[in-house]
Amino acid sequence: MAANVHADWIPADVAECYFQDTLCFDLPEKRDNYNKNEILLLFKKDFPQGLVKQVMKDHGLESLSVNALDSMNLKLQVASTNGQDPLEIEKKINRVYEEIEATTNNEYFTNASGVKKTSIGVYPKSLTGASRALTLSNGENILIGMVDGPVDIKHKDLKGKVIQHSLVDFNPESVAEMHHGTTIAGVLVSSNDRIGIAPNARLLSVSAFEYTDENKARSSSAQVAQAIDYAISKKVDILNLSFSGGKDTLVKRMIKKAADQGIVIVASSGNNNTDEPKYPAAYPRVITVTAVDHFSERYKMANRGKHIDLAAPGVGIMTIAPGDRYDFATGTSIAAAHVSGSIALFMSKNKRLDRLLITETAKDLGKPGHDIDYGDGLLNIYSALERVVKR
């Protein structure tokens, strides 16, 4: 297997890598958002497992798990580095082996919904025209996928609407563990007419985030990749990604695969108040969403950048919470869910999303034209849907 193969590999930063189904070499100069004691090995499904074991033995690695990424025809080996530097292991393996790609197991965090009590929590639907859009469409025959934390599928507003597949262990009685996922699910499909954007859509919840004692929900490249792969296998129409992290070759490739399958991908820009791109929001073919308040002003912690596509309500939003309760949530996570639900209304009438129509009908905010704060502006789903219905 030894060869100078990576001289012929395509760097992950260039377009050729993104648009080809190939192994791509990606060694960013600075990385710190990865598990310091794990490494990922990717190889074709028919590659002999015995050879993988030999590579791990030669490099002092210990197997933690092996899973298939069926949509990519790959296997994903998660291995412990036993105290070795994952970046050094990555370099060594990628310089020698043609059939195996090594990469770090990067961290992701949900774009946590900060609670902000407000008396105007029902403004979102009127701001984007979603209330009027519901007279034209209710999201019927659309399957929305979400990769997030666990959802309280027993909530009265979600009964019969959600299929849950969990890649992580969680306590079904824990409000904290299910809070973020449940708030997102509520905005997407709640039967409460003050909350749910697409009440007749179905929801596939793929739980890949675990609650931590830092009051955050954390995941990894391996878990997110498996979650996206599962969503692809279930043929979701829309995929909501309300989380963020750093650049990640594996997750980028999974998003490309999902987009190639016709899945509309929506991601939150992040709540770091920075113009440094966060991912998966900054990847190509992702609809990136920022959050605004009831005055259509940017949420003060929302990230900015040229990659921002749309703005949607995300400050003081009324939604559901675990245990048949309700809460108010703030953040770009909620705004992304608003856009995903709205796209479900659109696709219920036209399965081929007209992305240009969505941006053309948006209400321009901030500087004229596309800008780093609001993208193409505030979503106006009624205007976009009305054009489709009248065609």
Image: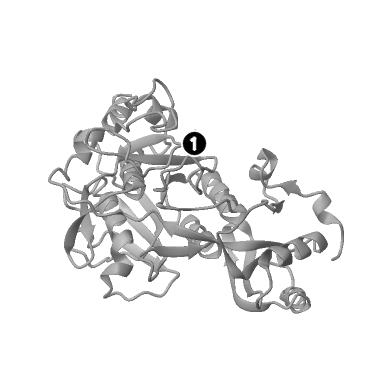
Using residue 38 as the reference point, say whether residue 114 is left or right of it.
Answer: left
Q: Is residue 211 above or below residue 4?
A: below
Q: Looking at the image, which is closer to me, 68 or 113?
A: 113
Residue at horizontal 81 percent and vertical 49 percent from the top: 8
Residue denoted by label 1? 307
Residue at horizontal 37 percent and vertical 58 percent from the top: 204
Q: Secondary structure at mark 1?
A: loop
Image quarter of residue 145: bottom left
Is residue 41 visible to us here? no
Residue at horizontal 39 percent and vertical 53 percent from the top: 111
Q: How many marks?
A: 1
Image quarter of residue 123: top left
Kind of residue at disc 1: His
Is residue 148 visible to us here? yes
Residue at horizontal 64 percent and vertical 44 percent from the top: 18
Q: Position of residue 384 (x, y in %)?
A: 32, 29
